[in-house]
Image (cartoon, grey):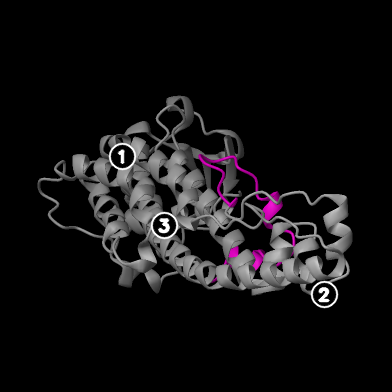
């Protein structure tokens, strides 16, 4: 009798028969409720990660602003030496152009703006924390550090303003950052960052599959004519400018931090957008099935043999979750399974 009550929300497949492997399936109504909590967790994570990514972009811009005069000094030294060596003054027009790092955030931010209505439709008031936390992105759009960010943020800001009134009873609800940080909710400084070590040739291979060409902040390296190259090769000051890729040139002149930080940011943005799009995809619900083995319940009323079918990396994927399904704490279960899902998303 107790087991029957605790398993409310799960039904036998086909109304009577246990499915293969003895798994039972959660009914559609309970699955929708669980999925709402699952989506809420992912959107909260998106908001935290995007705020952190914008902060990283601010730091990248500071490094780039510091790098630009170093590049100019190096090009001037190279021109002077080359002209002295063989009367050639190589042109560097648009050769080492450093774009504003905020520009590659514009595409993903516009994509977020376009799906804000879906967030409200799917989550209702539970989207309030996400919306309010995303507004924090624009809380400091003035001053030298944030030059150029306002234009990238404007479309999202307009969208946030429009949906902000949807949460009549939510007030100024924001994500409980403090409560989440201590529970493995964020991987700032870990995870993605740890997996990206090779700064030397990262930029030219990051791709542009999302919105604008994120990652392309260094512009396109201009080809050097043979005669000018011959002169430059005689000058030690020109050697960094002769390297095959802009990433290598930037590393040689300003160090590898700019390249590695840019790579980290672009991968973060790709993952953030991939999760956001999946969480709010109405055509392909992020969870299609939740199954469990009723005989796997422990003394804490937790089911240990649980399988979930999700929309992951563009495909419906099933796997056995390592998160126990706690009958006494469904929100925590949904949150932990959502974080497990986050870790499986690849970019």
Q: For the residues marked 1 and 2, what is the alpha-carbon distance in whole angstroms? A: 54 Å
Task: Confirm whether the magenta stretch covers residue 3.
Answer: no
Q: Residue at x 88, y 69 (%)?
A: 234
Q: Is residue 193 visible?
A: yes
Q: Position of residue 345 (x, y in %)?
A: 57, 49
In this rendered view, identify the residue nearer to me: 250 or 296: 250
Q: Position of residue 289 (x, y in %)?
A: 48, 36
Q: Earlier in the sequence, mark 3 or mark 1?
A: 3
Where disc 2 sits, the SS reads helix
Residue most extreme to the left:
168
The residue beneath circle 3 is 50
In this rendered view, identify the residue nearer to me: 334 or 243: 243
Q: Residue at x 82, y 63 (%)?
A: 87
The residue beneath circle 2 is 236
Q: Position of residue 256 (x, y in %)?
A: 66, 71
Q: Residue at x 77, y 73 (%)?
A: 237
Query: In the rendered structure, which segment of residues is drawn in magenta?
Result: 189-216
In this rendered view, identify the residue nearer to me: 174 or 34: 174
* Quarter assignment of residue 163: top left
Q: Is residue 211 left or right of residue 202?
A: left
Q: Residue at x 54, y 52 (%)?
A: 321
Where disc 1 sits, the SS reads helix
Where disc 3 sits, the SS reads helix
Q: Which mark is residue 116?
A: 1
Q: Earlier in the sequence, mark 3 or mark 2?
A: 3
């Amino acid at each position: 009798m107790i087991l029957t009550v605790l398993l409310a929300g799960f039904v036998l497949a086909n109304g009577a028969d246990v499915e293969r492997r003895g798994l039972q399936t959660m009914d559609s109504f309970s699955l929708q409720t669980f999925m709402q909590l699952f989506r809420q967790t992912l959107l909260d994570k998106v908001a935290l990660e995007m705020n952190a990514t914008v902060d990283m972009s601010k730091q990248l811009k500071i490094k780039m602003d510091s790098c630009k005069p170093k590049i100019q000094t190096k090009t001037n030294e190279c021109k002077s030496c080359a002209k002295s060596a063989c009367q050639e003054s190589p042109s560097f027009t648009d050769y080492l152009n450093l774009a504003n790092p905020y520009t590659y955030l514009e595409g993903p931010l516009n994509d977020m703006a376009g799906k804000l209505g879906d967030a409200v439709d799917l989550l209702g008031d539970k989207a309030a924390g996400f919306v309010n936390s995303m507004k924090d992105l624009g809380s400091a759009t003035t001053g030298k550090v944030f030059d150029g960010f306002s234009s990238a943020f404007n479309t999202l800001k307009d969208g946030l303003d429009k949906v902000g009134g949807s949460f009549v009873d939510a007030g100024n609800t924001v994500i409980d950052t403090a409560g989440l940080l201590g529970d493995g909710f964020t991987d700032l400084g870990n995870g993605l960052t740890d997996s990206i070590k090779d700064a030397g040739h990262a930029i030219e291979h990051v791709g542009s599959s999302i919105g604008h060409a994120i990652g392309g902040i260094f512009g396109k390296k201009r080809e050097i004519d043979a005669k000018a190259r011959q002169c430059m090769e005689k000058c030690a000051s020109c050697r960094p400018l002769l390297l095959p890729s802009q990433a290598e040139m930037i590393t040689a002149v300003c160090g590898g931090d700019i390249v590695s930080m840019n790579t980290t940011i672009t991968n973060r943005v790709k993952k953030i957008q991939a999760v956001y799009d999946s969480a709010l995809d109405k055509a392909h619900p992020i969870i299609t099935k939740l199954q469990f083995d009723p005989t796997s319940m422990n003394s804490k009323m937790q089911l240990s043999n649980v399988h979930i079918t999700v929309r992951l990396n563009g495909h419906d994927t099933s796997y056995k979750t390592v998160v126990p399904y706690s009958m006494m704490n469904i929100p925590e279960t949904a949150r932990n399974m959502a974080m497990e899902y986050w870790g499986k998303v690849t970019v």
